[in-house]
Image: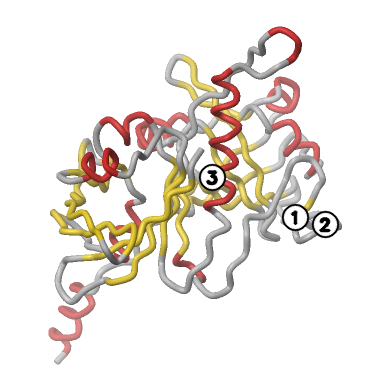
């Protein structure tokens, strides 16, 4: 009986490790207006890091911070100074970043030099959206709990404007794209769903999905058959491959994806909601797709 117990313990899978890293805030980070992400974390996850990340504190306040890259190093930069000022960060404070899926969302906890966690500021808000310092709260939906995954890989925003202060066509596209994504994340459903902002590589080749979402709701590994529906009248069969490349997991949709993009005129900057409406008894899964035009 004892050997059987040991065998059961050995066969029990360990819970998946959540990518986490710590960072001690130095005067240089506050003075330069940027915080370097630990090189070891960057080296391990470089291909998964987007151009912008969302940092959420324990109260639910969310901050969008743009990343900058140079010579293999990555920094939190645009938005970092506002973040540091809002939480009154000082030299020696410790930040703990815990990955929340999609590599664009992190839960951040802040500790003082005395090792105690700070008291997080709570500001007044209008319609549930705080107005201070650029922080905001993502739309709440108590019905779906942990079933919401948001994946956003932003392209760098252009800095130039045309004469007279008018936005260039490229800037207008970026602004419209942000509006499309904002509308998409307000989507509500009791079903699990994934929000994806369309990037050039997604339109031209394969769609990359959140690995945690796919492994939880579609299949853990290998090739999965899926169906994408715009309405009950028409569906597009596609395949999703879950695998590992250079020690990094990936989930990509192909073999039918291009036809879906072409026939539904999906463009760069559009935001798509993939709502799982039928998980199926086999490895098939059906997603109802909502397209929010940029």
Residue 159 falls left or right of residue 211: right
Mark 2, mark 3: which one is toward the viewer? 3
Quarter holding the N terminus is bottom left
Asked if the residue at tag 2 contacts the one at tag 1, i.e. Cβ–Cβ closer than 8 Å, the answer is yes
Instruction: Determine whether 36 is above or below 218 in the image.
Output: above
Q: Residue at coordinates 48% horizontally, 49% vertically from top-left?
A: 20
Q: Residue 115, image x and y in percent?
A: 70, 52
**Which disc is residue 181 wearing?**
3
Q: Residue 93, image x and y in percent?
A: 71, 41
Q: Earlier in the sequence, mark 3 or mark 1?
A: 1
Label 2 crowd (10 A; few <14 / some 14-19 / many >=20)? few
Mark 3, mark 1: which one is toward the viewer? 3
Q: Residue at coordinates 21% horizontally, 54% vertically from top-left?
A: 236
Q: Secondary structure at mark 1?
A: strand
Asked if the residue at tag 1 contacts the one at tag 3, i.e. Cβ–Cβ closer than 8 Å, the answer is no
Residue matched to label 1: 129
Q: Residue at coordinates 86% horizontally, 57% vertically from top-left?
A: 124
Q: CA distance from mark 1 to mark 2?
A: 5 Å
Q: CA distance from mark 2 to mark 3?
A: 22 Å
Q: Residue 137, image x and y in percent?
A: 68, 54
Residue placed most toward the observer, 259 or 212: 259
Q: Earlier in the sequence, mark 2 or mark 3?
A: 2
**Which disc is residue 125 wearing?**
2
Q: Residue 81, image x and y in percent?
A: 74, 31
**Which disc is residue 289 wearing?**
none
Q: Secondary structure at mark 3?
A: helix
Residue 19 falls left or right of residue 83: left
Q: CA distance from mark 3 to mark 1?
A: 16 Å
Q: Secondary structure at mark 2?
A: strand
């Amino acid at each position: 009986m004892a050997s059987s117990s040991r065998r059961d313990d050995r066969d029990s899978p360990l819970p998946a490790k959540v990518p986490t890293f710590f960072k001690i805030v130095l005067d240089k980070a506050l003075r330069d207006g940027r915080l370097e992400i630990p090189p070891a974390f960057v080296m391990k996850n470089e291909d998964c890091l987007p151009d912008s990340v969302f940092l959420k504190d324990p109260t639910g306040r969310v901050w969008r911070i743009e990343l900058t890259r140079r010579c293999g190093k990555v920094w939190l930069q645009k938005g970092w100074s506002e973040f540091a000022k809002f939480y009154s960060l000082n030299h020696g404070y410790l930040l703990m970043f815990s990955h929340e899926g999609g590599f664009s969302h992190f839960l951040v906890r802040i500790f003082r030099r005395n090792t105690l966690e700070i008291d997080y500021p709570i500001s007044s808000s209008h319609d549930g959206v705080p107005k201070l310092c650029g922080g905001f709260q993502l739309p709440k939906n108590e019905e779906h709990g942990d079933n919401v995954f948001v994946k956003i890989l932003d392209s760098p925003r252009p800095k130039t404007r045309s004469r007279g202060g008018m936005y260039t066509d490229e800037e207008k596209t970026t602004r419209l794209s942000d509006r499309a994504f904002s509308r998409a994340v307000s989507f509500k459903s009791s079903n699990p769903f994934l929000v994806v902002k369309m990037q050039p590589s997604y339109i031209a080749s394969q769609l990359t999905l959140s690995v945690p979402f796919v492994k939880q709701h579609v299949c853990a590994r290998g090739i999965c058959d899926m169906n994408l529906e715009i309405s009950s009248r028409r569906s597009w069969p596609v395949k999703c491959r879950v695998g590992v490349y250079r020690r990094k997991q990936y989930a990509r949709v192909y073999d039918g994806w291009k036809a879906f993009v072409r026939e539904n005129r999906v463009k760069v900057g559009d935001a798509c909601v993939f709502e799982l409406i039928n998980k199926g008894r086999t490895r098939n899964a059906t997603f109802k797709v909502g397209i929010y035009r940029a």
